[in-house]
Image (cartoon, grey):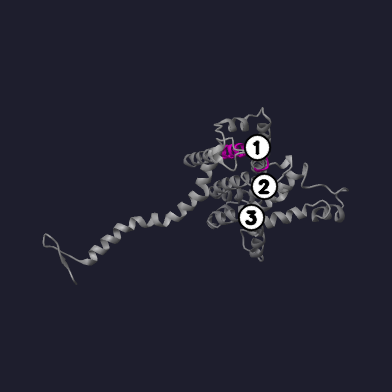
Amino acid sequence: MATTTTRRGATRSPRAGTDRARRSRRPLLPYLLLAPAIVLELAIHVVPMLVGAGMSLLELTQFHIRNWSTAPFAGLENYRLALDVDSAAGAELLRSFRTTVLYTVASVGLSWVLGTTAAVLLQRPFRGRGLLRALFLTPYALPVYTAVITWSFLFQRDTGLLNHVLVDQLHLVDDRPFWLIGDNSFGALLVVSVWRSWPFAFLCVMAGLQNIPGDLYEAAAMDGAGFWRRLGSVTLPMLRPVNLVLLLVLFLWTFNDFNTPYVLFGGSAPEQADLISIHIYRSSFKTWDFGSGSAMSVALLLFLLVVTAGYLLLTNRRRNDA
């Protein structure tokens, strides 16, 4: 092996120098691998959020949309007008916020109950279980636009399948109800949301059930515990870590849901189903008041951050106490 002589007379192998160079470059490898993801995250999420925060401080309307530099600086005026419940804009935003909270609580609760029930019932092997699992996951696998457009056809008053079954086949009602306007619109939106969300809850809970040791169920059965006792004493406590993450994800997805009401109602949701995402969209792109719409978006972001941080702190404190 060829060697080189150093100043002090010691010999050094060329391979040793190569290994040292590789070790010096190795700490940079993780950062190089993360660089594309970081760049995309900045371009897709961080930069638009900063731009939106900047727009919320401007009186940006249709008169200045071509040249933002001409828009007057409004400061926090957009936030004051949007959050002032005594004003017309603030009252509408508060009503939309209440509707969104009710919609989120109902959708997340029903999705979790349906997903957990289906996962528990399909926990034991039986003939046809694989087929049922595939069928249950179908709504989650379908593209959102395809699924919601299909539901919009089902909810049509004259040609929809729902009214055909209720009125023509079962004769449960006399008149064909309107499902996409008026008071029925909230129920129609909730049905579509639960139909799309519960398979995700089913998938997460089903994965969590696989990690529960069978010995716990055998010990509970030997102690005389029935199905409901095993469910409350073994299954649900062991699923607590999964449910903590699942409920948070479902809450964020549902509260921010824009695609479902937009596709179902065509961008102009009725008052009874006016979610805050649609309300912000209409305030921005229908009235061309982008400054006010941006202020509402930033306020919504701050609200979700506060709720998420409080939820994580509360769950971590309970976990530490346990």
Question: Which one is in front, 177 or 63?
Answer: 63
Residue 256 lies, in percent from the top left, at: 61, 45
Query: Which residue position is annotated with label 1?
Result: 97
Q: Main secondary structure of the magenta part?
A: helix
Residue 32 lies, in percent from the top left, at: 39, 56
How many residues crowd mark 2 within 10 Å: few (<14), some (14–19), many (20+)? some
Three-letter amino acid code of the residue under disc 2: Leu
Task: Report whether 232 appears left or right of 3.
Answer: right
Q: Earlier in the sequence, mark 2 or mark 1?
A: 1
Distance from disc 2 to disc 1, alpha carbons, whole Å, reads: 20 Å
How many residues crowd mark 3 within 10 Å: few (<14), some (14–19), many (20+)? many
Distance from disc 1 to disc 3, alpha carbons, whole Å, reads: 26 Å
How many residues crowd mark 1 within 10 Å: few (<14), some (14–19), many (20+)? some
Query: Which residue position is annotated with label 3?
Result: 199
**Label 1: which secondary element:** helix
Q: Earlier in the sequence, mark 3 or mark 2?
A: 2
- Residue shown at 27%/60% (left/top)? 21
Question: Which one is in front, 194 or 184?
Answer: 184
Residue 302 seen in render = no
Q: Earlier in the sequence, mark 1 or mark 3?
A: 1
Three-letter amino acid code of the residue under disc 3: Pro
- The residue lying furthest to the left in this view is 9
Picture quadrant where residue 10 is located: bottom left
Point out the stretch of residues depicted in magenta.
Answer: 285-304
Task: Report whether 187 appears left or right of 171.
Answer: left
